[in-house]
Amino acid sequence: MIKEHKMKLFACRASKDFALKVAKALNLELGSADILTFSDGEFQPSFNESVRGATVFIIQSTFPPTDNLFELLLMADAAKRASAHKVIAVMPYFGMARQDRKDKPRVPIGAKLVANMLHAAGCDRVMTCDLHADQIQGFFDFPVDHIYASAVFLPYIKSLNIENLAIAAPDMGGAKRANAYARYLECPVVICHKSREKANVVASITAIGEVAGKNIVIVDDMIDTAGTLAKAANVLKEMGALSVRACATHPVFSGPAYERIAESALQEVIVSDTIPLSSDPDKDKSKITVLSMTEIFADIINKVYNYEEISSSFIN
């Protein structure tokens, strides 16, 4: 007699709140696991319940510090060594994704290295959201479920009933995403062209397309220091835009990001909960709207576990 493989859902520390919401949507209890931390900072995860023969989903976004990634790897290794049937890494935010190619000599391809490490740790599958570059899926030698945050962003933007709407890409690389949004919302596209002095430092931005008299929504996969975003919003406003909003999946929000958003011409910044916002009460979050991806992830997890097709769940 073939036994049914149980579904087990576990969370690493950085994505505990996200995982709790996913578990609630699935009507499951989050699995019990502990982290033993040594005095030098080394840590050792352990499962407090059997995972033998189970399909184990481990939820963790791998934003800095690197401990978040390594905790996921250790959890996957522990599950595999405990005889889990399958180990699936659920990574709402896939860190190192900007290192998807050699853009200059003598640099690593970090995204490929992470893919190799996940495979070495015993993962059988990865589930993630809005990769910085779609081709990163090709770095894996096992299935990747690439979820799009447009499933929650597009209905929200549509609900705002914005007149004279235009979708903007913050750079040439975001043109495909912006075009997909504009096609769904039946509105024009504006492309921002930027030149950089160095990483995270934007020298200048120009906009291509009709800006004057438009209510513009800039779409991107992530906001890091918000330098590009704030500058683009200010430039668009100076060019005659009636209002400027931004919509980005991953709120990395490093360095002066919160301050730049608060002081910019942005009316609203719409993000998902793939990365938790800062708990610092002094950070100005008044312009930030957070939409949850947890029900989308719960739906995909359930379908993957039950071997159901998932393509109909995506709006791209």
Image (cartoon, rainbow, N blue to C red):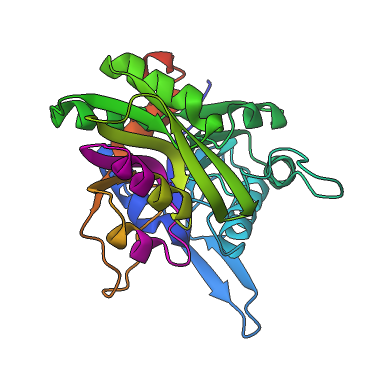
Q: Residue at x 39, y 52 (%)?
A: 230
Whether residue 169 is in magenta: the answer is no
Q: Residue at x 73, y 40 (%)?
A: 112
Image coordinates of residue 238 in percent, x first then y, are 31, 44
Q: Looking at the image, is 140 positioned above or below residue 114? A: above
- Magenta part of the protein: which range? 233-260
Image coordinates of residue 191 in percent, x first then y, are 45, 29
Image coordinates of residue 105 in percent, x first then y, are 86, 46
Q: Is 20 displayed left or right of 72 in the figure? A: left
Q: Residue at x 58, y 49 (%)?
A: 95
Q: Residue at x 33, y 32 (%)?
A: 296
Closest to the observer: 10 or 268? 268
Q: Quadrant of the C terminus?
A: top left
Q: Looking at the image, is 219 positioned above or below residue 32? A: above
**Quick check: can you spot residue 102?**
yes
Image coordinates of residue 277 in percent, x first then y, are 34, 60
Q: Is 168 displayed left or right of 270 in the figure? A: right
**Quick check: can you spot residue 273?**
no
Closest to the observer: 60 or 82? 60
Closest to the observer: 172 or 219? 172
